[in-house]
Amino acid sequence: MDSQDAEEPVLSEETKELLANEPVGSCAEGATWISPYRLLLPGEQQSPNAISRVDSRPHKPHFVFEFAEHGFLGDQINLKYMKPKSGTDSTPDGKEVELRAFKLPLLKLGQGNVLKLTYGQISALAGDFYGTLNPISSVKSDAERKKFFFDAYHTLANNPQDQPKDARNLLGYLQKEIDEVQKLYDAKKNPSEYYKEGTGLAGIEAIDKLIKGRHFPGYKDLLLINWDHFGDDARTAYTTGHSAAISWAASGQWTVDRLVEAYAINSFADHYLQDLFSAGHLRTPRRVLHGYLGLADALANVPHIQPPIPSALIMDQG
């Protein structure tokens, strides 16, 4: 259907009022509404629990275009968890509970003043900020793809040379960006105005300056070969990581630590799954844009950071 022929989504007056008063990005236990851009389509019914004024988080989740989208999606899921039997016995105690992902740290980086990362934070950092120059989808065998996936994962999870300083610096920088965009939301202004002030692609240099000296590729280097985040290549990258997480959970001794490690691996893989729900990641022929000068590689990043439009909504036709 041509975007010009599409009917304008209709919101009830009650829904409009709820949206107007709801903190942007707020999502309570069990809520199904996940985006301030998500509008009801013609004939679609509003779920009774789709919008809630209650949020049990100690800090309200912020919502923006790239980093925070991944973090928000990852941290709102439910994880099955069992506590260890004791401080010396990490065997599960058999009492299964469900925890919201933001309540369960999955990775602890460093010693002493450790940096704890949740499911959403790992998903948000994966691939875009942590990886290698070997795209997961660039090889044919499952074994090679699995190796490339773990090589990328370990730049974050098993990298004492760079962590926790590298991740802590990145999270601090990215939170400042999120806060600035949040101010525009609160003022009922278009958040894209923030990127017109020279951040956007210019932010690539700022990030690389911040993480200078790391022992693996920087942000710009990863961007130039990031077709793992687009189309069928993203599907390949995700299924590789998801399969690796399942194998990790099913192998070795059954302990709480093993389960948490598997969740951490899966959260890294989920970044590529989340990318598949971005119209810009579906419509951009990323791999064929890879070129010698790198300009097309950089510009391929533009479509998926633009504010969503109704004609770019992702629909499940199944």
Image: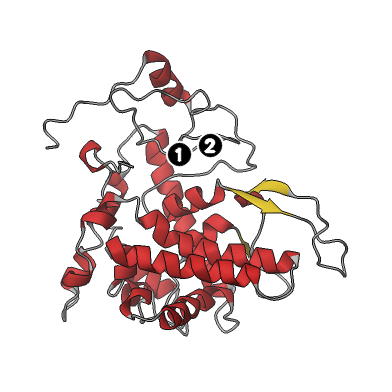
Residue at position x 44%, y 60% in the image: 271
Q: Residue furthest top?
A: 13
Residue at position x 53%, y 73% in the image: 156
The numbered mark at residue 27 is 2
Amino acid type for the residue under numbered disc 1:
Ile
User: Would residue 173 be visible to someone looking at this image?
Assistant: no
Locate residue 7 relative to residue 35 in the image: left or right. Answer: left
**Do the CB atoms of the residues marked 2 and 1 lie less than 8 Å apart?**
yes
Residue assigned mark 1: 34
Q: Is residue 98 above or below residue 272?
A: above
The numbered mark at residue 115 is none
Residue at position x 46%, y 78% in the image: 146
Quarter occupied by the C terminus: top left
Q: Position of residue 299 (x, y in %)?
A: 19, 64
Quadrant of residue 128 within the rendered picture: bottom left
Residue at position x 38%, y 20% in the image: 16
Amino acid type for the residue under numbered disc 2:
Cys
Q: How many marks?
A: 2
Quadrant of residue 251 within the rendered picture: bottom right
Quadrant of residue 45 within the rendered picture: top left
* Mark 2, secondary structure of its residue: loop
Locate residue 128 relative to residue 28 in the image: left or right. Answer: left
Q: Position of residue 91 (x, y in %)?
A: 81, 65
Q: Is residue 117 above or below residue 312?
A: below
Q: Position of residue 301 (x, y in %)?
A: 26, 62
User: Would residue 45 be visible to someone looking at this image?
Assistant: yes
Q: Nearer the viewer, residue 248 or 123?
A: 248
Q: Earlier in the sequence, mark 2 or mark 1?
A: 2
